[in-house]
Image (cartoon, helix red, strand yellow):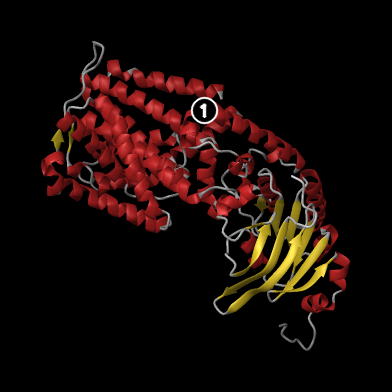
Amino acid sequence: MTPDSDQPLLRITGVKMRFGGVVALGGVSFDVGYGQVRGLIGPNGSGKTTLFNCISGIYRFMEGDILFEGKSLANVPRHEMANVGLGRTFQNVALFKPLSVRDNILVGAHHLAKSGFIANALRLPDVRREDAAAEERLNDLLDLLDLRSVADIPAGSLPFGTQKRVEMARALIGKPKLLLLDEPAAGLNHSEVDELAILILQVRDHFKLSVLLVEHHMSLVMRVSDKVVALEFGLKIADGTPDEVRAEPEVIRAYLGDTHKEPVH
Amino acid sequence: MKTSWIVAFLVLLAAVVPTMTFSGYHLFQLTMVAVYAIAILGLAILTGINGQISLGHGAFYAIGAYTTAILMASWDVPYWATLPVSAAVCATVGFLVGLPALRLGGLYLALTTFALAVAIPQILKHKLFETWTGGVQGLVIDKPEAPFGLKLSSDQWLYLFTLGVGVILYVLAINLTHGRIGRAMRAVRDQPVAAEAMGINLAMLKTRTFAVSAMYTGIAGSLGAMVVAFVAPDSFTVFLSITFFVGLVAGGAASIGGTIVGAIFIEFVPNLADLVSKAAPGAIYGVILIAMMFLMPQGAGGFIGMVWRRLVR
């Protein structure tokens, strides 16, 4: 499909979310374009993860809308998100620990196949065909993400950095159009963060997808993002290229603080 | 892969030999091992692989047993034809039990299924169903004769029949749990939120897994009824459900091969305990169980898997 020139891949318009009396998102709007790496930054409690969860359907937002290729995600069931074209990783890594790396990644291809219980129990030809197709993609990903040597090892026994790559592979095998990365740099050491930066761009180019990157790690976001949006207290305080956002006084204040702290409305 | 087929073939060959050599009672015990193995396999698919704890699988075993007994006693249905009916009935009941299971996680589900196991003997005794179930007396059914003029006793034929059904069910279960659906079952057990984000419909997967599980244990119940040639409510108390659970854990919850070890355990260890001490077989049983948990923390399945990997490497 050819992307419409003025329609972005993901459009977030005036999304509001409250938990009891607490306003987690006070009407946030921004776009993620085709092929774009979009950074989403903000201090703790600024609403990054809430917004992330609104996009992936874990929370249902109260006002506004989230459009994916022009269609609202408001009522899409969570298990349909992968079909729609959303792939994601998790903040604290949510791998299937006892399963091998291979099986972990293959679960990500679940929605691409249709065979049910009976077809699987009888191992009908359709099942074999689906398996072969998934295996092929798996093999590409094992090489791309340098996981071949650990393919048969239980995912839970791997170092944290490797687990994050497994999660990325699991999201990518499902052919997402938008990859949601929830703090991929958390818990990584310096050199691993460098590798991650290269990997994100590599993945974007190789799979021709867009990335929404939620991250604390400033230098990573600024290095890989085409555009960055900054949140504070559930409101957008900056939106633009990394250089523009970095120069924004509100962002500097939110991150570095000032001596006479005033609430932002 | 080839080696596993050879091992499977040898195990099968070893399993057929007793038909000719074993006496009646030992053959009966061996047949019950096959029956229990299928029952525990059903539980392993649900609890070990999909992570839904059931302490009430004796209920499905009872429903399978009664379905077969009623069909044979009241309608003269041939024994083999009761199996598909029993499978369908138990799968349906399992599916329905699986619906509330969606809202009840972990321990609450365990208690709910436990309640089912508590209720089933009383339901079977109830006046409303007495004409079919025979009430407290239960039902006596005829043991099937060997077909095609085979020179086998009823017991010998039933052993081979149970073994044959078992082999088919194991092959189907291995296929099911080693493909896309099996991966999804395990994924849901380990990380439901992530599994859902990968496109797995949790409600559909869990209820269907419950149905398959109940179907397996129900078929085991049907076979058990044929082997014992008798069903009565008090054969299906809560203790049966707990026994299946013991077999599951002893075998290694998520291991398909381990279910056979689990079945051997629950069939023979009580006898063994009885031999050791007539006065307190329960205590001996407990000691053996605890010792087993210490020596094989992953159950027999995990232990065998470990030895297997050492040998292959």
Q: What residue appears at the point 87 percent right and 69 percent down from the top-left corner? A: A244
Label 1 chain ID = A
Rendering coords of residue B91 (x, y %): 35, 40
Quadrant of the rendered image containing residue A229: bottom right
Give the side of residue A4 with respect to residue B155, left or right.
Answer: right
Give the side of residue A245 with respect to residue A71, left or right.
Answer: right
Q: What residue appears at the point 27 percent right and 33 percent down from the top-left corner? A: B222
Rendering coords of residue A88 (x, y %): 66, 53
How would you rate the neighbour count of disc 1 (Cα within 10 Å): few for under 14, some for 14-19, many for 20 or more?
few
- The amino acid type, in three-letter code, at marker 1 is Leu
Rendering coords of residue B223 (x, y %): 28, 31
Q: Nearer the viewer, residue B144 or A154?
A: B144
- Image quarter of the C terminus of chain A: bottom right
Count of numbered marks? 1
Rendering coords of residue A200 (x, y %): 78, 52
Q: What residue appears at the point 23 percent right and 29 percent down from the top-left corner? A: B226
Furthest-bottom residue in this view: A260
A248 shown above or below A260: above
B134 shown above or below B195: above
Q: Is residue B71 visible?
A: yes
Q: What residue appears at the point 48 percent right and 23 percent down from the top-left corner? A: B7
Q: Which residue is mark 1?
A: A124
Quadrant of the rendered image containing residue A193: bottom right
SS label for mark 1 = loop
- Image quarter of the N terminus of chain A: top right
Q: Nearer the viewer, residue A260 or B207?
A: B207
Q: Is residue B220 visible?
A: no
Give the side of residue A14 with respect to residue B199, left or right.
Answer: right
